[in-house]
Image (cartoon, grey):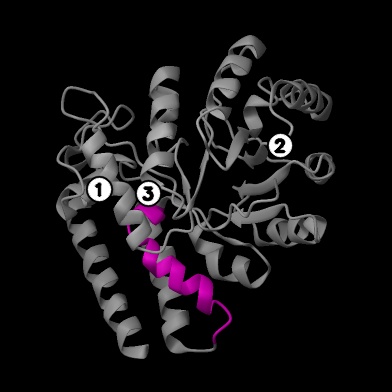
């Protein structure tokens, strides 16, 4: 059961057709793009996938398709853990567990839907563990929606000590918290994977086992290089670290629609339709297309520098 759900972990987009159906051909090209650009693990059904806007049938089929498309080349993890009631959570988690994934990712705020504290989380966790196959690896995700529910140290240890958890998508966005969790994890195999671009390199140096931020949908290959070279004392590493942190500041400007514009430019899929970003990002976020141009230019520049340094 002790798989490694770590490394560069893109939080996958869900491409849609203009009439609001999942674009399966676009999904196939997207999976190939992630793999070609350094992905180690695909997070197939997550917030970036617009999972709160997907039916259970869509979540299940999306997870199955990504497993099939990855074909063992990289690991695949999925969540789809979005419901409020325990009965609905049981139905969705059991269904997602049967999609062939390497690990099923639980959402921290769904373990404590009313933000009541550790005992509520413990009760939910006990119930969920009783529903799922004992040999299924699990992950945790401090998803920001509908609210960010960070784990306390005691809650982290509670999950660690079950022996079931192999990855935490850490959304603390705090280097000291990452360091503390790395120490708490020890040799348990419970990997801490940071999701914040501003601390990406420092978190890797502190023991984070990769990166799983939203800009893995823009330039995952640059994060893959940084993961391998985070401790390197070079101008290239330092300047790339700054560029990645600043580029990721574009996230509030219509993500995930922003990333869909990027992929339409690349030809990965044809439509920028999104169930979450249901507005024209160019109209609401002034000069966002110019910003994407700058990010594209910077991305290409760093790719050239990396190639020259190889």
Q: Is residue 116 above or below residue 67?
A: above
Question: Label 2 crowding class (10 Å Cα cut-off): few <14, some 14-19, many 20+?
Answer: few
Residue stretch rendered in magenta on the structure:
215-232
Q: Secondary structure at mark 2?
A: loop
Residue at position x 62%, y 49% in the image: 170
Quarter of the image where the N terminus is located? top right
Q: Pointer 2 and pointer 1: residues touching (CB < 8 Å)?
A: no
Residue at position x 72%, y 52% in the image: 190
User: Foreground: 113 or 126?
Assistant: 126
Q: Which disc is residue 29 wearing?
A: 1
User: Foreground: 193 or 42?
Assistant: 42
- The image position of residue 50, as x and y in percent, is 39, 31
- Residue 55, visible in the rendered structure: no
Location of mark 3 (residue): 251
Q: Secondary structure at mark 1?
A: helix
- The image position of residue 80, as x and y in percent, is 51, 28
Location of mark 2 (residue): 135
CA–CA distance in space, label 3 to label 1: 23 Å
CA–CA distance in space, label 2 to label 1: 31 Å
**Magenta part mainly helix, strand or loop?**
helix
Q: Pointer 3 and pointer 2: residues touching (CB < 8 Å)?
A: no
Question: Label 1 crowding class (10 Å Cα cut-off): few <14, some 14-19, many 20+?
Answer: some
Question: Label 3 crowding class (10 Å Cα cut-off): few <14, some 14-19, many 20+?
Answer: some
**In the image, which is nearer the foreground, mark 2 or mark 1?**
2
Mark before the other along the chain sequence, 3 or 2: 2
């Amino acid at each position: 059961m002790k798989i490694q759900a770590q490394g560069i972990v893109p939080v996958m987009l869900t491409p849609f057709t203009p009439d609001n159906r999942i674009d399966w051909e676009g999904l196939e090209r997207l999976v190939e793009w992630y793999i070609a650009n350094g992905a180690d693990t695909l997070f197939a059904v997550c917030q970036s996938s617009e999972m709160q806007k997907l039916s259970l049938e869509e979540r299940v089929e999306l997870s199955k398709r990504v497993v099939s498309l990855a074909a063992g080349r990289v690991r695949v993890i999925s969540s789809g853990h979005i419901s409020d009631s325990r009965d609905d959570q049981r139905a969705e988690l059991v269904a997602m567990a049967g999609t062939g994934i390497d690990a099923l990712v639980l959402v921290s705020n769904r373990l404590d839907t009313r933000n009541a504290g550790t005992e509520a989380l413990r009760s939910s966790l006990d119930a969920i563990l009783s529903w799922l196959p004992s040999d299924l690896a699990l992950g945790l995700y401090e998803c920001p929606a509908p609210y960010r529910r960070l784990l306390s140290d005691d809650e982290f240890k509670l999950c660690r000590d079950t022996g079931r958890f192999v990855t935490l998508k850490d959304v603390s966005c705090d280097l000291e918290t990452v360091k503390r969790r790395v120490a708490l994890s020890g040799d348990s195999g419970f990997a801490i994977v940071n999701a914040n671009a501003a601390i990406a390199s420092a978190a890797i140096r502190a023991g984070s086992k990769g990166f799983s931020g939203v800009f893995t949908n823009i330039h995952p290959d640059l994060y893959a290089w940084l993961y391998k070279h985070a401790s390197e004392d070079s101008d290239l590493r330092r300047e790339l670290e700054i560029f990645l942190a600043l580029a990721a500041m574009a996230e509030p400007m219509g993500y995930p629609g922003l990333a869909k514009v990027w992929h339409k430019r690349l030809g990965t899929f044809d439509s920028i339709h999104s169930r979450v970003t249901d507005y024209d990002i160019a109209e609401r976020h002034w000069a966002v297309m110019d910003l994407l141009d700058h990010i594209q230019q910077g991305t290409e520049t760093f790719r050239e520098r990396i190639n020259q340094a190889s």
